[in-house]
Image (cartoon, rainbow, N blue to C red):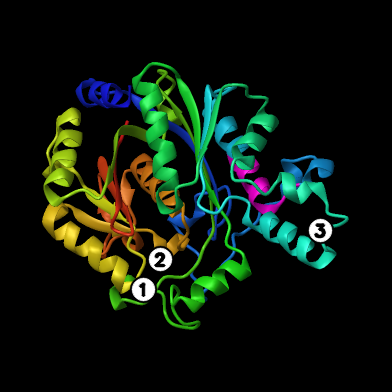
Amino acid sequence: MIPEFFLFLRHNKTMNIYIQSAGQISIQSPLSETWFDRPSEYDKVYVRAQEPDYKQYIDSGKLRRMGKILRRAVVCAQTAVQRSGIAMPDAIISGTGLGCIENTEIFLNAMINEGEELLQPTYFMQSTHNTISSRIAIELQCHGYNTTYAHKGISFDSALFDAFLQFCAGKIHSALVGGYDEMTPRYQLMLGRLAYWRKDGEEVTLRRGKEAFAGETSVSFMLTDRNLPESDRLCRLAGVELLYRPSDAQLQTALDELLQKEGCSLSEVDAVMTGMNGNPSVDDAYRKMYNRLFSPCVPASYKHIFGESYTASGLGMYAAAVCLQRGEIPAFLLLQHPGGLKNVRRILLYHQYENKNHSLILLTSC
């Protein structure tokens, strides 16, 4: 069944799938696009998300029983739904690398400290990865397709690809797709011992090759193939490709087919948004692939603004979608154009995780 489904997708005509709305809670100002004009800047290794006033969105009784990641996910989802004008999504599809890791840590520590006695069930129930999608569905009263992808650094891309397949098969007409991850002090410290982060106090800049800094991700998108008012849309999702350990030729073929479906060439793509994070081992892989495949396009990046996390690619797509809605890419997202880029119509997102999992996402203006 899977090979036949992929064959169908490869030969399917261009789909009109729109990113109708989005909501984000990150290290930038939450539930807003103020970062586009005035991005918050950090010189720390570890930055937690800026929290909104959750009492405006969630009942106080429920709020006390929800961890940070669940609060963020629910509010982001509610925001995306309200902004979209779609009362109920046909599907809820989430990607998370760490799941509800803070509740997991609390539960495991309680097991150690309490000798496996008098444990609070709430932390156990909210410690699994699929709790996030389930909680969103409960709050929205959505009984449709519901699934979670926990594929580390490719989790959000997998969730988006699933939604794209569902649209192509005609099984759904709207989908709430999100990427959610929190970074706890213990987990950040563990990665720090593995030399994953830069040293505290070092300047965050891609141009000097400094290492990555930790951020947190909560971002939700409402996707639809319905012909809703264009003024409310962010952009159009033209195509998604996922590849595992591809050769350069296979990646080139996937890129060519993605562009061919859209009826454009690489020279007509305004920018390539990559997952460069300032870590030399990561950035070198991106630079090599950029020189091989994407050199006609202007290079852009986003992790120096939103930080690094397993689902940071969701924030990359969010940043690209906002840029397409406004028709420009600000200078702080670009690596070569100090004056910014105007009249933007197409942005290609290229993401790779450990140089094994690769994704190509093409977004266009409406």
Mark 3 and mark 2 in contact (Cβ < 8 Å)?
no
Q: CA distance from mark 2 to mark 3?
A: 42 Å
The 10 Å Cα crowd at callout 3, few under 14, some 14 to 19, many 20 or more, is few
Furthest-front residue in view?
115
Tell me what residue is drawn at x 40 percent, y 66 percent: 304
Residue 338: numbered disc: none
Q: Amino acid at mark 2?
A: His
Ranked by sequence position, the earlier of labels 1 and 3 is 3
Tell me which segment is drawn in magenta: 66-76
Residue 205: numbered disc: 1
Query: Where does label 2 land, which residue?
Result: 304
Q: Is residue 296 left or right of residue 344?
A: left
* Residue 68 belongs to the span the image colors magenta: yes
Q: Amino acid at mark 3?
A: Glu
Query: Where does label 3 land, which residue?
Result: 116
Location of residue 234 in the rendering, given as x and y in whole percent from the top left corner: 41, 36
Q: Does residue 43 lie above or below 181 as drawn?
A: below
